[in-house]
Image: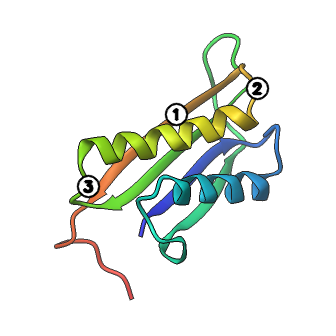
Amino acid sequence: MPHIIIEHSEDLPVLPQVLVEKVHQATFSSGLFDLPAIKTRAVAYQHYKLGEGKDGFIHICAYIMAGRTTQQKQLLSQHLLECLRTYCRRSYCLSVDVRELNPEIYLKS
């Protein structure tokens, strides 16, 4: 845990695998998770509509187990957004959302 899902427009200014690697490392650099526990993946979208003057988008949804403080979740959001700003043009819509998973409902095998 966590699961880091990167949704993005197809026309990234960086190779998708490079973005996955950089976001994966940014998640680790937050100091909140052990490297072997982080799972990062990306999904490209062909069809989307953005606000005026925007060329593309990247949205990260970080699913983490419940129990972290608000400050820890903010720290993770900041690390991920800073990572995106490093690799993307100003004309991109960038966003990060940290969501908690309920340990009583979340299952895996």
Could you tell me which quadrant the C terminus lies in?
A: bottom left
Residue identifier under label 1: 95
Which residue does the image show at 65% across and 43% down from the upper left?
A: 8
Q: Earlier in the sequence, mark 1 or mark 3?
A: 3
Q: Earlier in the sequence, mark 1 or mark 2?
A: 2
**Residue furthest toward the top?**
52
Against 46, is 16 above or below?
Answer: below
Q: Position of residue 105 (x, y in %)?
A: 21, 71
Distance between mark 1 and mark 3 Cα atoms = 20 Å
Circle 1 or circle 3, nearest the eye: 3
Helix, strand or loop at label 1? It is: strand
Task: Please name the amino acid that badge 1 sits on.
Answer: Ser
Give the crowd class for mark 1: few <14, some 14-19, many >=20 residues within 10 Å.
some
Query: To which quarter of the image does residue 97 belong?
Result: top left
Instruction: Give the number of the disc on residue 68.
Output: 3
Task: Please name the amino acid that badge 3 sits on.
Answer: Arg
Give the crowd class for mark 3: few <14, some 14-19, many >=20 residues within 10 Å.
few
Which residue does the image show at 68% across and 37% down from the upper left?
A: 47
Instruction: Give the number of the disc on residue 89.
Output: 2
Of the pair 44 and 32, the residue shown nearer to us: 32
Colour setup of the view: rainbow
Task: Please name the amino acid that badge 2 sits on.
Answer: Arg
Helix, strand or loop at label 3? It is: loop
Q: Earlier in the sequence, mark 2 or mark 3?
A: 3
Give the crowd class for mark 2: few <14, some 14-19, many >=20 residues within 10 Å.
some
Against 108, is 71 above or below?
Answer: above
Left or right of residue 107, residue 96 in this image: right
Against 52, is 17 above or below?
Answer: below
Q: Position of residue 92 (x, y in %)?
A: 68, 26
Q: Position of residue 66 (x, y in %)?
A: 23, 60
